Image: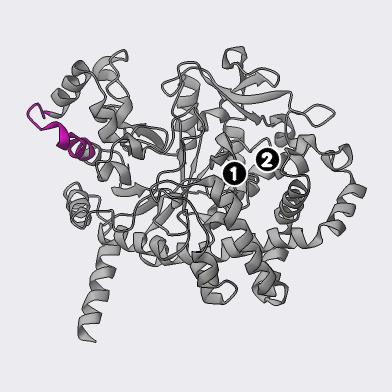
Amino acid sequence: MKREAGILLSVTSLPSKYGIGCFDRAAYDFVDWLEKAGQSYWQILPLGAASHGGAFDSPYQAFSAFAGNPYFISLDALVEEGVLSREECDSVDFGSDPTKVDYDRLHEHRLPLLRKAYERSHVTTIQGYVDFTRENHWWLEDYALFMAVKSFFGGENWTQWPEDIRMHYGYALDYYREKLYFEIEFHKYLQYKFYEQWRKLKAYANERNIRIVGDIPIYVSPDGSDVWAHPEMFQLDENNMPTQIAGCPPDSFSAEGQVWGNPLYDWEFHRQQNYHWWVTRMWYSFKLYDVVRIDHFRGFDEYFSIPANSQKAADGHWEKGPGMKLFRELKRQLGDRAVIAEDLGYMTDSVRQLVKDSGFPNMKVLQFAFELEDSGWANEYLPHNYEPNCVIYTGTHDNETLNGWFTGLGKEERDRIRYYMGQEQTPLKWIYKKLIRLAMMSCARICIVPLQDWMGLDNSCRMNVPGTVEVNWKWRLLPNQIPTELNDEVLEVTKCFGRANWDALNRQKSVEEQSERD
């Protein structure tokens, strides 16, 4: 079984002078960095069009299961096209802290720039745009109308709209399509530019033998076009209001459990439709990514159901999900595809069996391996207990950074970890490197390390603290912040443990030799 490695870095975290990481030069430079470091994968967070404000800056709460985030559109590319000027972009204040995404300022200033680009683009005369809208009409029409109507009503949640459009009545749809024609076209344009730029970036990565690991949430946002346009797919009442919502009971991420608020699927409806929507969603995801990580995989075995009028996870209960029926249908229609099953959190024998039956590699998180109240040296997250068909992470977007985590542990836990690694004498400031080596030397087929962990950054660079709002999804790299010597260090460790991407390294060597001959 081939051993591989990759790095987790959100697109939002790439450096950019325009407030947020996007599909600009920095993204291409990072792909080059991955190639030189011998990596096989770039894992990202969801690319969806996230709503704005508090918890809703989360990439796991998107306006659509299919639409991309317009913030990722490169303004530099639009300047090169001639639909924006450099002066217009440079005159905007995207925030005073280049290490954090300021979503308030993005919301206030970036969309007006994109609107100027649309107004100057004459996009409806471009064949690529015509082809894109035709090929994607099955989701794009609902999404663009949803976004236009939402803007018309001042950003209100769709459940607060007037009854006729809230209930998706045909005459109301016709009325708003005519009334908001240009606003609808604007949102189609944004999606066209997003996918045009993303396809170029992904092709660039694939040409260098770097594969993209995408991330899709199991659920869709309660304030999104999927629920509004297709209420029959969800557990809603006669007024299209949720009756039950998603969440999770207490686990290692949250002592009180979490109420996510997402509407739950009507799995019986999906079964009767041969899981058509899910098959389509996965098919579309594989157009965007080479590997798909499905967040909260255990929800396919059993899902946690909380009454919609409750804000306490303790009021919830477990219900049976579709299980292998869904994955057999996916395989029948799509064939074998590369999927990572995020099976973290509350585990049962039936969840473990579902992961095994699916054949998908599951996730191991090194930070979970040393919890003292757990099962001692039999802890399933300890590397000596792994089976090869898994993906080991030093941490995920929901964890502390590796350095921040170890630094914050008590003496007993630290001593336990040092004993396990045989690193009793290693100085504290270098322990994170030994932990990465522990992950890399494991039998797991794939090892994914967040860039923050490779850089030894503290918890100020953490991506998300589950169960909290306001402070998450904001961390960004500064230009040239990655130490020059780190590339060689990552490459040597990756080579040492048999995970180097030799196709990428040989391609790079060939390019360098050709450059010398020229």
The numbered mark at residue 330 is 1
Residue at screen point 57% across, 17% down: 313
Residue 387, magenta (yes or no): no
Classed neighbour count for the residue bearing mark 2: other residues with Cα under 10 Å, few (<14), some (14–19), many (≥20): many
Q: Position of residue 435 (x, y in %)?
A: 21, 35
Residue at screen point 63% across, 50% down: 66
Figure disc tally = 2
Pick out the residue farthest to the right: 171
Q: Position of residue 387 (x, y in %)?
A: 31, 33
Classed neighbour count for the residue bearing mark 1: other residues with Cα under 10 Å, few (<14), some (14–19), many (≥20): many
Image side of residue 503 versus residue 52, left or right: left
Residue 187 versus residue 56 in the image, above or below: below
**In the figure, residue 474 lies in which quadrant?**
top left
Q: Badges 1 and 2: C-beta atoms under 8 Å apart?
A: yes
Element type at mark 1? helix
Element type at mark 2? loop
Residue at screen point 74% across, 46% down: 150
Image side of residue 516 versus residue 1, left or right: left
Residue on which disc 2 sits = 275
Secondary structure mainly formed by the magenta segment: helix
Regarding residue 423, the answer to whether it shows in the image is yes
360 or 125, which lies in front? Answer: 125
**Start and end of the magenta stretch?**
422-438
136 or 470, which lies in front? Answer: 470
Q: Earlier in the sequence, mark 1 or mark 2?
A: 2
Q: Position of residue 325 (x, y in %)?
A: 61, 34
The numbered mark at residue 272 is none
| Disc 2 residue type (three-letter) | Tyr
Pick out the residue farthest to the left: 425
Image side of residue 401 versus residue 87, left or right: left
Residue 482 versus residue 166 in the image, above or below: below
